[in-house]
């Protein structure tokens, strides 16, 4: 592909996303489902699909989008808030595993796919999409809501669980020995502990070292550090997203405030590419054969995520409205589910796992944000009172201020 064609296709894609974002804003819905459907429209199976170069760039942008989403979400919270949340909410993490991994495991075993493929499907149904959830919290102005720390604790626990799950699954898929399993788990545990200690003890020192009068220098330093740490985490089979989140947690003071302003446009651009990439990865010709099973699995695990969020928010003393908001926010699946399916298929798992997973992710990544948008009317129905109008703040206010107006 020539450079001119690449630029034309990329520019057209961004303009399409801008139109979809405007449409979402006009009808009062999250832009996420529209970006996902936009990815489907320009993906495999349609006559106007994008070239390979632009698809490769979009995949890279998607990875960077998740990193930036989680990094900037981490900037909103202090180290003490993180560790207090993890200590308080680990029972919610246990409930999350039991409720949401079990449907995938049972489904795989009943389908006769064998234990290892069923274990892969358990991971696919277990983990929420950190990218979708964090984007929703920002987009709907809920970052400072009372239920948000409980949501974040569940997400962090899920990503930490993935640090143990992925080495275990990989070893089982390739037929690794018991020693390989133990070694992978020990390495994961050591690296996670080291990252948490650095974030807690040396966060202020790191912030002081990064600070500079030049916004350009701060932007380059923070972006480079975040992507580097995320890449190192990925290299040792840890979550790049949770590594970026910990970098955000570690920064504080003036550096954190300036970074929120400087990196917001980058986050929004690459986050949009992340949602498009999910749609691009789906071949629509494969959807009809698995959509029934994907919808059934989606309904079951949407319900179990609702229960998870309700339980986590209830433990934090949040009211019914906040519990419903927490539950609906966790429904969407995304990047990790796709990664798990890709690993499993590459190692010889059932080929149907691929289209089933992508269809399942598309359904919940569309349904989840819509459900979250209407979570408060749902809560009012549960409480048996008339729905109150949304108190969403004007979009021109800064993110943290918008959240605090709720």
Image (tube, helix red, strand yellow):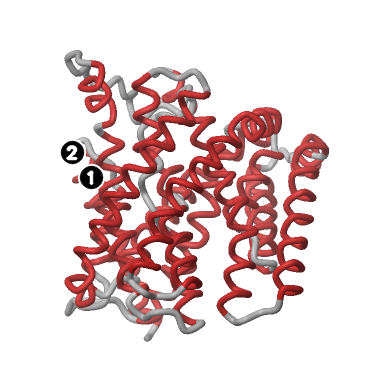
Judge from the rendering whether residue 50 lies leftward or rightward of residue 116; answer left or right.
left
Tell me which residue sits at (38%, 36%) in the image: 307
Q: On the image, which quarter does residue 261 sit in?
A: top right
Residue occupying the point 53% across, 40% down = 154
Toward the top, the furthest residue is 385
The image shows residue 379, relative to residue 236, as above or below, that is above
- The local secondary structure at tag 2 comes to helix
**Across the whole image, how many numbered discs are drawn on residues?**
2
Image marks 1 and 2: residues in contact by CB distance under 8 Å: yes
**Is residue 261 among the parts visible in the rendering?**
no
Numbered tag placed on residue 402 in the rendering? none
Which residue is at the front of the view, 10 or 118?
Answer: 118
- Between 250 and 2, the residue placed more toward the observer is 250
Instruction: Give the x, y percent position of residue 406.
Output: 39, 19
Q: Left or right? Give the position of 125 relative to 30.
A: right
Q: Which mark is residue 26?
A: 2
In the image, 284: left or right of 119? left
Q: CA distance from mark 1 to mark 2?
A: 6 Å
Q: Can you give x and y, in whole percent of width and height, for residue 127 in the image?
A: 47, 52
Occupied quadrant, residue 295 = bottom left
Report which quarter residue 1 is drawn in.
bottom left
Label 2 Cα crowd, 10 Å radius (few <14 / some 14-19 / many 20+):
few
Note whether 355 is above or below 218 in the view shown.
below
Q: Which residue is mark 1?
A: 22
85 relative to 272, above or below: above
Any part of residue 88 in sight: yes
- Could you say whether the residue bearing mark 1 is in a helix, strand or loop? helix
Nearest the viewer among 39 and 213 is 39
Give the crowd class for mark 1: few <14, some 14-19, many >=20 residues within 10 Å. few
Residue shown at the point (31%, 24%) measured from the top left:
392
| Residue at image coords 19%, 63% | 292
> Residue 326: x, y in percent?
41, 32
């Amino acid at each position: 592909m020539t450079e001119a064609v690449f630029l034309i296709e990329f520019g057209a894609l961004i303009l399409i996303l801008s139109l979809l974002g405007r449409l979402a804003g006009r009808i009062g819905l999250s832009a996420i489902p529209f970006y996902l459907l936009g990815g489907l429209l320009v993906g495999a199976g349609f006559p106007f699909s994008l070239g390979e170069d632009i698809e490769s760039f979009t995949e890279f942008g998607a990875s960077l989008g998740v990193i930036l989403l989680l990094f900037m979400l981490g900037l909103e919270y202090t180290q003490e808030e993180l560790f207090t949340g993890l200590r308080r909410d680990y029972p919610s993490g246990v409930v999350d595993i039991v409720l949401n991994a079990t449907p995938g495991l049972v489904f795989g075993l009943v389908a006769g796919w064998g234990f290892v493929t069923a274990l892969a499907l358990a991971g696919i149904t277990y983990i929420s999409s950190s990218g979708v959830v964090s984007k929703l919290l920002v987009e709907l102005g809920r970052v400072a809501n009372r239920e948000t720390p409980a949501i974040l604790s569940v997400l962090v626990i899920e990503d930490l669980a993935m640090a143990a799950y992925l080495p275990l699954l990989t070893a089982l898929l390739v037929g690794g020995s018991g020693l390989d399993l133990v070694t992978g788990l020990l390495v994961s545990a050591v690296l996670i502990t080291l990252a948490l200690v650095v974030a807690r003890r040396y966060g202020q020192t790191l912030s002081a070292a990064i600070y500079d009068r030049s916004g350009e220098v701060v932007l380059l330093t923070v972006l480079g550090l975040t992507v580097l740490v995320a890449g190192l985490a990925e290299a040792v089979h840890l979550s790049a997203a949770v590594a970026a989140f910990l970098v955000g947690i570690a920064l504080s003071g003036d550096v954190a405030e300036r970074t929120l302003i400087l990196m917001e446009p980058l986050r929004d651009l690459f986050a949009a590419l992340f949602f498009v990439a999910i749609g691009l990865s789906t071949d629509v010709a494969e959807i009809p054969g698995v959509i029934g099973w994907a919808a059934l699995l989606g309904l079951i695990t949407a319900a179990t995520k609702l229960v998870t969020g309700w339980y986590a928010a209830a433990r934090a003393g949040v009211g019914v409205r906040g519990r419903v908001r927490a539950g609906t926010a966790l429904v969407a699946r995304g990047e990790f589910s796709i990664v798990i399916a890709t690993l499993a298929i590459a190692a010889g798992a059932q080929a149907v796992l691929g289209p089933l997973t992508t269809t399942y992710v598309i359904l919940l990544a569309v349904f989840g944000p819509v459900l979250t948008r209407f979570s408060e009317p749902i809560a009012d129905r549960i409480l048996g009172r008339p729905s109150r109008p949304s108190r969403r703040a004007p979009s021109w206010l800064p993110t943290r201020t918008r959240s605090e107006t709720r």
